[in-house]
Every structure is written in structure tokens, then in C-alpha cells.
Amino acid sequence: MKWLPWLIFALFGFFLVGNNFSAKLGMIDDHEIANFLGSDGKIGLSEIPKVIMTTEVGQWGEYLRYRPVYYTLRVIESSLWRDNASLWYFSRYLMLVVSMWLGFKILTTYFPKIVSYLFIFYTMTMPFWPDLLTRLGPSEIYTVPAILLFVYGLVQNKLWMVSLGYAVCVGSKENFLVLFPILLGWAGFKAYTSKLTRNELIATIALSLFTFVIVGSILVATAKAGTDIYGTQISYRYRITRFIWDIPKIIMSRHMIPSLFILAAGLFLGMKKQVGLMLVILAMIASQYIFYVNQLPSNMRYDFPALLLFPVLDLVAMSMIITYFSKKKLSSVVKIGVYSVMILIFSVYIFHRGYTLVHRQAVKNAAETRGFASEIYKAVAIIKDKPNSVIIFNSERYIDFEPIASVSRFLTTAGVSNEFRLYYNPPKTTADPMELDDRLKQVMNGELGTDHIFDRFSTYTTDDKPCYSLTFGPAIPVPGCPAIAKF
């Protein structure tokens, strides 16, 4: 019954994120969709390349990250789904179902189906999934099925899977550049064993060039800024030193001692294949800790794939035990014992953790996005027939930077053509590590800068034009401008 896994994962996926289907486009991240759609609310087929080039794809070496595949997919989705949130969330649901199916196919290559099912159900209890599965913006949602496709391609020796999975991962998030040495190792081993085909060689060269373009852009941009996208100082020496210093703590907190013991035993017994795989997994884990400066776990999307690799390491360790005893007299007993232990451990974790975090976050996301959409609709209903009125965006906090940009974009997509102004009145003592405070003051004074986020805003002045205000956070109402929505 080849359809049974699809049915099981489709039902399980709906059980996890079904509440998302009642959500709307949200204030954070989703305004990018509105920006792509523009005032006509759509992207024609011929417009797709132009819209893609307005993102960081068209700013090589200027932005602190470079994600050509992420933005290509996001713009294509915007063209297809437009502002229909149900279609956006359904696409995420499908990606989740496909991801679980790919993981299952990889696992059943080495383990019984019951163990494979339970491992999938167990991994979905991890606390980073709520942040990843209940939002439309995170690039990790593309990398989840992509990295599994990459691994499945290696297992099945399918070039198109390896190539597509690699391109989506590396082109969507820079922490997946760790796959590059794995790609080279795969191609190198095939070349060494005289099994590298012409198509595989061409694909490896093309993917390598693609990788160099991404790395080059990031290096040029970070050399100018001196920090990464998260505002962290670029100091590889410090990052590596800190990781090495924290290794004992990581080993204890992630319960790695049994797997490391099995790794040492496998090294002693000459089990090169499993030992090599475990070392690759450990190297991938190390790369993620170094990339995020040991700020894992965060219980957010940044934990993927690092935290998922720890149980994968345990799986390989279990397979090593089974492989070692496969030619011994007690092979059947050992195999049954190992599988029984795995089933017990996975079941306990599933029962103990459950899926409350995902359900709760999906419900919260649906409520918050519906509330945001309601305020947008209310504002549009009031001002759409009053094109001569000025819309005052009223804020006193620099953290309203993205909400202000978001609301302006959603109003534009809704057809609002009124003049926008920003009244920004922060406290005198404002600690702002990202300089958003200064940027909002500049917008208020008509100094829009070069990033075009606030191109629709005029200099704030008090005149006799009729006006309405949109209030952000605890800002005090603007005198003479009735508040029509609050964000």
C-alpha cells in the first residue's frame, strides 16, 4: 500500500497545522508579499523576473545575505497565491507532508516501518517546529523538504534529487553552505571509484559555481559592514574558540555520550562507513553552532537543522550496533532489542512532549493575523473614498519600524492612494542597536534613504488637510486626526 504513508502524513500534518487554514496574512514578514503584488494586487508571468530583481537577488554584494532561490520561489508563490492566505498555508502544509514522506522513505531504507513512523512523529515534537510551521516568511520551510530530497538523492543515487535539494538549500539560507563539502565529497568519491558520470560532473561544477556566487556576495557585503545579518561581529576565530570551549556542555545537554561511545567503538572496530557518516553529522552540527555563535537551542526556526541532527546521529549509532552484530549468533536478538528500545524511547518522548506547542502557536497565529487583517480592512473602509485625506502613521517606538512598513504596503495593495506621513515621537533615551530609531526620524523629516521602503511617505507637517491616524503600540493619539486603526 504505497499510498498509506501519504495518507498517514496528510492526516498527521493536518492535525499539526490545521489551525493555520483560518489565518490571514500577518503583519510581520508577510508584508513582503503585499510589496511584491503592488497596487494592482497581482504579478503577471512577464513581471516575475523584474520583481525578483527588486529583492536581494538584484543586489549582489550589497546585502548581508544572498538567497536567490528563496526569493525566486517566494515571488513565484506570490504570483500564484496572491494575497489568499489559505493557499499560502496550504502550500506550507503540502511541504510538511512531502518532508515527512521523504524522511520516511530515507528511514525505511535502513529501519522497519514502525520505527520510521515513530521517529518522524518523535521529531515533530521538537520545540522549533511551531516557529517554522506557523509563519509564511521563514526560508527554512523550503529547506526542510530540500535537505531531505538531497539526502534521499544520495541514498538512491538520483542526480536530479541531489542537485535540486542542494540548490534550494544553499540558495535559501546561508547556514546550509555546509552541504558544499558534502557535495564535493560525494562527487570526489564517485570520481575515485570511476563512477562519476558526465552529467554528475557537469552538475557538480554548476552547483559549485552557484555556491561561489552566493559566498562571494556574502563576503563582499560583510566585509563592508563588519557584521553578519544578525548584527554579530564577524570573528571566525572567536566563534570557533567559543564552540570548542562549549563542547562539553553541548555533549551533556544533548545527551551525546552513548552515541560518542558507539562512535569510538566503531572506529576501533574499523566500521568506516558508519563512522564516516557520524563524523559528517558531527561536522554539520558544529557548523551550525559556529554559524549561530553557540546560541542554540533557541526553540525557534534557527534550531533547524542542528537539533534534528542529534537524533539522526543516534539513529546511525543504533544502525552501527545492528550492523556489527548482523553476522553474529545473536543477531536477531540484538536487532529486536535495539528496535524495541528505539520504539520505547520514541513513544515516551511523543507521550511526554506531545504537540501542544504547535497547536497553541497555530491558534495564536490565526488569531493575531485575523486581528491584523481586521484593522487593515477597517482602515481601508474608512479612507478609500477620501483620497484627499492624509494618513498619519503614529508611533513612539523604533520596534514599530517593520509594522509601519508592513501596514503601508498592505494599504498600497488594497488600493489606498492617500498621502502617507509618519509622526514619530520616541522617548529621549532610546537604545537602538539596529539604528531603526534614526531611520524613522529621517522618514519623518522626509529623508527617505535609498532602500525605498518608505518611498510613499512625505515630510511630516501640520497643515489644514483632513487627516486620519493609524496608531502603533502605546502612542498618544495625534490631535485633530481621528484614530481609525491600532496595530
Image: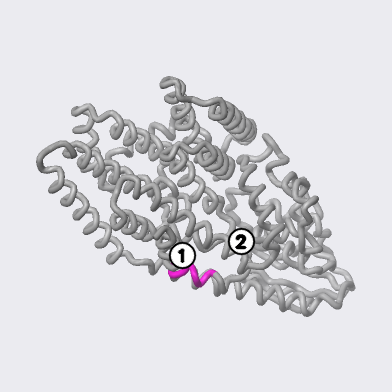
Quarter where residue 216 is shown: top right
- Mark 1 or mark 2: name the one nearer the start of the chain: 1
Q: Main secondary structure of the magenta part?
A: helix
- Look at the image and give the residue range highlighted in magenta: 13-20
Label 1 packing within 10 angstroms: few (<14), some (14-19), many (20+): some
User: Which residue shows up at 43% across the image and 56% down it?
Assistant: 100
Residue type at mark 1? Ala
Q: Is residue 275 positioned above or below 73 on the image?
A: above
Q: Which residue is mark 1?
A: 10
Q: Amino acid at mark 2?
A: Ile
The image quadrant where one finds the C terminus is bottom right
The answer to whether residue 101 of the structure is visible from this angle is yes
Q: Position of residue 224 (x, y in %)?
A: 64, 33
Tell me how far mark 1 sits from mark 2, CA to CA: 28 Å
- Judge from the rendering whether residue 444 lies leftward or rightward of residue 261; answer left or right: right
Q: Quadrant of the N terminus?
A: bottom left
Residue 468 or residue 89, whichever sits in front? 89
Residue 472, picture quadrant: bottom right
Where's residue 329, x and y in %? 10, 40
Residue name at image x 58 percent, y 32 percent: 207
Q: Residue at x 84, y 64 (%)?
A: 461
Could you say which is closer to the camera, residue 267 or residue 131? Answer: 267
- Residue at image mark 2: 28
